[in-house]
Amino acid sequence: MASIIAIISGKGGSGKTTVAVNLASHLAFIGKRTLIIDTGFGIRNDDIPLSRTDELLYNLGDIISGEAEFDDAVISGGDNSPDFVGASLGCVPQHFETQFERMLDKISHRYDFIVLDAPASVGREFDACCNASDTVIAVSGEDALSRQNTSLCLSRITNADSKEFYLVLNRVRFDSSDSSPYCEDIADEVGARVIGIIREDEFVRHSLETGDPIVRYDTYAGRELENLSRRLCNEYINPSSNMLTERLFEKNRLILKTQRGGF
Ligand code: ADP
Ligand code: MG
């Protein structure tokens, strides 16, 4: 059965799509059978970063409403890229929650990982993603608004005991941390352990727009997103594999211990 990972955030623009697309792309690249689902209704996120816009015949809404089978709607990623189900431009269907869980139950055995790119903030799709997942990754900026909203989102999640919660701090500016709280304090504040720190990286936007995942490139964000993916596969990644990240970790006095892989 697949591990189902929901990528959430309190605020829009935090980096959910960046994390979801790159995480799924790297997992597929290292041979994990991976599916990514764009779970927003009325908006689309992942098709451009995955270069799949032209192939979107059916979408998640079509599967939920019974207009299409999962196999008609899924776009195969081949050997090196994730399979993809795109977002619907319609409204959230009436029985979305139960149909979504049913669909995931049916296909879960086919994959090692299913990555759910949740829409910003809370709502039915957010709740459905969190309910269906065994792992929730909240993507947050370091600023107080992001932290507050991340914390509020996480506190909404039911059945929390059966899930793992992680925090990815995104768009961290290396020069701004003197006045910002330490990572471990942020992790305590929002109630999730830090599993990744991703720097502000000018190449991220270019990669999202061109559909060429940054995780394939040797840039700060590329390496840090690869490390995130490897940590989720229980690999031990020494923070010193990236000197600048190591300095960030040091600076933030991050305790190098989690249940997964001891990072
Ligand atoms: P969300 O899905 O949470 O709305 P996105 O992943 O779409 O957020 O990111 C929003 C914007 O922020 C995009 O324009 C993207 O290029 C930019 N961005 C995200 N992460 C980074 C980063 N680490 N460095 C620089 N820009 C980033
Ligand atoms: Mg998005």
Image (cartoon, grey):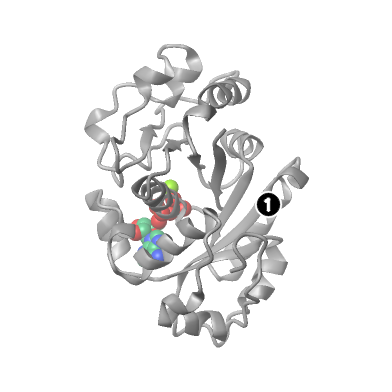
Left or right, 207 with reference to 155: left
**Image quadrant containing the N terminus:** top right
Reading the image, the residue beneath label 1 is 154
| Up-down relation of residue 74 to residue 77 (above or below) | above
In the image, 19 versus 245, the foreground residue is 245
Where does the image place residue 215, in percent across and percent down from the top left? 34, 58
In which quarter of the view is residue 6 placed? top right
Residue visible at 41% across and 37% down in the picture: 43
Q: What amino acid type should be assigned to the residue bearing mark 1?
A: Leu
| Up-down relation of residue 238 to residue 58 (above or below) | below
Where does the image place residue 28, in percent across and percent down from the top left? 37, 45
Splitting the image into four quadrants, where does ligand 1 fall? Answer: bottom left
Where does the image place residue 47, in percent across and percent down from the top left? 32, 39
Residue visible at 56% across and 40% down in the picture: 4
Where does the image place residue 53, in percent across and percent down from the top left? 26, 35
In the image, 145 versus 136, the foreground residue is 136
